[in-house]
Amino acid sequence: MIKAIVEKKEKDRNYSDSDKECVRNPILIIRNDNLLWANKEFWLLNDKYSSNEISPTLIDNIIGIFKDGEWNNSEDGSKVCRISIGKDEPPYYITHLPSDSFGFGETAIYQISQSPNRKNADNSIRNYNITAVINELGRKLDHSYRLEDTFKIILIGATAGEGLGFNRAFLLLYDAENKAFRGEVAIGPSDGEEAAAIWMELDGSPKSLDELINNYKNATLKRDVKVNELVREIFIPIDNLCEQLSKVIRNKKPRIIKEGSCNDSTENGWSLFKILGIDCFAAAPLMVEGNIVGLLLADNMITRRPVDDSDLEVLGIFANHAGTAIQRSRLYEELAEKINELSSANEKIRESQKKLIESEKLTAIGKMASQVAHEIRNPLSVIGGYAKNIKRKMDDDDKFSEFMEIIIKEVERIEKVLETFDSLSKTAPEEKTIINFSELVKGVINIAENNSSSGMRIFEINKMEGNAKIFGGEAQLRNAILSVAKQFIKDDKESFPISVSTKIEGEAVLLNFIPQISDTGKKHPNTIFEALYGNSPLKRDTVLTIANEIINRHLGMIGIEQGKDKPLSVYIKLPLYKE
Amino acid sequence: MHNVLVVDDEKVLSKLYEHELVEEGYNVLIANSGTEALRVAQDNQIDLMVLDIKMDDMDGLEVLNEFRRKHTDTPVILNSAYSIYKDDFSSWLADAYIVKSSDLAQLKEKISELLKI
């Protein structure tokens, strides 16, 4: 027995005249003898006959039909049952729409019409002003800038009852890089239960197309996941389209694509039917200035209403609007992205300026502290030094000895204060300047060479890049390079001299240390590698670790290179300074 | 007697060092600039150099670099009113780094240690 579970308020709704003007066929969805959903046309019909003497409600009448009615097979495989509602009323026909082929299980969809022929019945409901709908959708698309919203409007427009009225819609976009159509987004129920749930929710929502678009998200939330999973499976290379879809592209006109018509075609034609789970759908090209940017596919999987030429014509007009809207949204999003990038770059510049000012302030304070310490410390050393010298030579009972002691103590007190100045100058970051990298390297090599007690020439300066400029703290970088250079001095002398060279490589400048004798020379890079990246922190060289940190902070790196035809080398890479 | 070269552009300070180090038994040579220091080092047998860093003509680190070319084993003590150069790798070439102070005990100890007296 059928039990009506639709809330009472649904039945008690008042319908405006405009609602009645767009009347469609009453539809019911029933699962396991429960009425899951019925459209408002059904309830209008139900209300109309609820006071009838013969039958208190249409539902009651239908219950009887389900139990005792005579069902006949129609041409398209659906079952039809004739019902008589009132004494002088024309007969109605209940059509049980075929559902076995798309796995609804116990869910059944019924349509009530005044014609036993489904096609006539469906056509009779298309008496609303389609031009007004297209205009409204076009206006809505004209004001949509975000791609996601545009997709939403297109899909809702194609599927909403107040729109083009298809059950499901799939948007495929042309992927120029892969020369293929790729499924992007879809909308619609994937079975009878979902259809009931979505349509019931939409029935309770405001009914204008405009409001529907705004409220559709809630109705489809989590419910059109399945169709979106399906659409993402779609990937059709342009040169592998079935003949019917190829005609859509070639002729730039919408077509009805039937499974049979693609029988002799490519596998992709077949796979598309498999993915969509239907045997017939409409396909319209999305065009922008004569170029196809995608395809809009639509079907009536739930109601099985055949797609006819008038559907196709409307879909084609709508697809033209949609193509332009997609292109406009894409351009708008690209522009928005550029604006965002620009804003983000501006923000970074502002942040950098702020940091620079802070850093400059600290540097200035540090410099000043250091200079003050120097200027005071020198004369203080003289005063204190002489005072101590004199005090040593005085007898303890000398009447000036006590005064000398006071001078010494006061000098020591000031010297203690100066130590705090030292710590201040140490915390200040080093001032960054533009540095000639090759000159810096030459200076470092000079220092390193002089530091050696071997008496041998350790380094051989080879090709140096004259224009390599970097930006950073000169003293820090000098220290870092020197600490790497010193690693070579520590080791055996068999591989001396070590070739030193600089070169520009892309956006970076490279300093290379290459031992001349490759076999024994391997020791140096390996030692350095161990010292830098050894597994045990205890085995890592503290100085080299600091040097690595300095180079990293300058967005560079210290590395070891060993190619098949290249000698083993140690390199320091730093970003080139750009004006 | 060890020859100690004191390099400082503050004449009163180098005079103090001379006075104190002579009392310690060293033969003290004075240079009041970097250039003068290199010349004195060239003309004399130097056993140890006490070297200031911040000087007008040539800073102490440059002098140290030049000096090391010919005197690889001669100990050098960097003696500066600046403490920041202690962290500069250029100062590695020196054997010790002392921040100037009215108390010369640390300097005297270091000289004695480096000359292995």
Image (spheres, coloured by chain):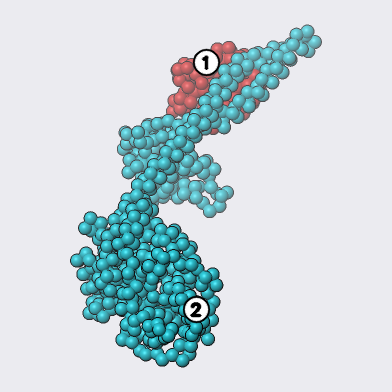
Secondary structure at badge 1 equals loop
In the image: residue A283, left or right of residue B15:
left
- Residue A558 position, x and y percent, is 43, 45
The foreground one among A28 and B34 is: A28
Q: Is residue B48 visible?
A: no
Looking at the rendered image, the quarter that the C terminus of chain A falls into is top left
Mark drawn on residue A183: none
Q: Residue at x 47, y 84 (%)?
A: A62
Label 1, label 2: how far apart the Cα atoms are = 116 Å
Q: Label 1 marks which chain's residue?
A: B
Name the foreground residue: A492 vs A219.
A219
Is A79 left, or right, of A374 in this rendering?
A: left
Q: Residue at x 46, y 91 (%)?
A: A68
Q: Which residue type does callout 2 highlight?
A: Ser
Query: Mark 1, mark 2: which one is toward the viewer?
Result: 2
Q: Which chain wears cyan?
A: A
Q: Residues within 10 Å of mark 1 (few under 14, many from 20)?
A: some
- Left or right: residue A266 versus residue A560 is left
User: Which residue is the extreme one toward the right?
Assistant: A397
Kindly identify which residue carries mark 2.
A50
Q: Is residue B31 above or below residue A18?
A: above
Name the spot of residue A379 as percent of width and height, x first.
60, 15
Residue B106, position as x, y percentages in the image? 64, 25
The 10 Å Cα crowd at callout 2, few under 14, some 14 to 19, many 20 or more, is some
Q: Do pointers 1 and 2 mark residues of a single chain?
A: no
Which chain does red denote in the image? B
Residue A443: which quarter of the image? top left
Say what amino acid the circle numbered 1 marks.
Answer: Asp
Residue B9's disc number = 1
Secondary structure beneath dot 2 equals helix
